[in-house]
Image (tube, rainbow, N blue to C red):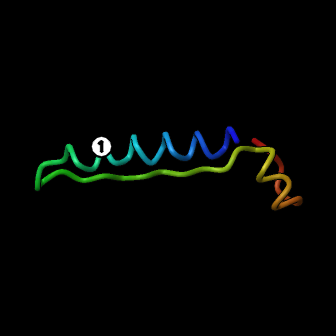
Amino acid sequence: MMREKKLRMLKHAMWLVVFSFDLGDRLFIVTFLIAKITKRLLPHVEAM
């Protein structure tokens, strides 16, 4: 339930950002994995 609410909030926030752009504006989205997820997905990689 909380996950859906957070996703809805994220979508709304992104909508506000995108629709406040001017023609020359750019948006860069940077993603990363936290160490726990990285360790689970790639067990041979040590967390930094």
User: Percent from the top left, x then y, of residue 11?
Assistant: 44, 48
The residue lying furthest to the front in this view is 1
Who's the residue at 20% across and 43% down the image?
A: 20
The residue lying furthest to the right in this view is 43
Above or below for 16 versus 42: above
Tell whether 9 sits left or right of 47.
Answer: left
Above or below for 41 versus 19: below
Callout 1: 10 Å neighbours few (<14), some, many (20+)? few
User: Percent from the top left, x then y, of residue 7?
Assistant: 56, 46
Front in this rendered view, residue 8 or 32: 8
User: Percent from the top left, x then y, of residue 1?
Assistant: 70, 42
Tell whether 17 sits left or right of 24.
Answer: right
Front in this rendered view, residue 1 or 14: 1
Say which element carries label 1. helix
Tell whether 39 sits left or right of 21.
Answer: right
User: Percent from the top left, x then y, of residue 37?
Assistant: 78, 50
The number of discs equals 1
Who's the residue at 33% across and 48% down the image?
A: 15
Who's the residue at 30% across and 52% down the image?
A: 27
Question: Which quarter of the figure is the C terminus placed in?
Answer: top right
- Residue annotated with mark 1: 17
Who's the residue at 48% across and 43% down the image?
A: 10
Image quadrant where residue 3 sits: top right
Indicate the amino acid at tag 1. Answer: Val
The residue lying furthest to the left in this view is 23
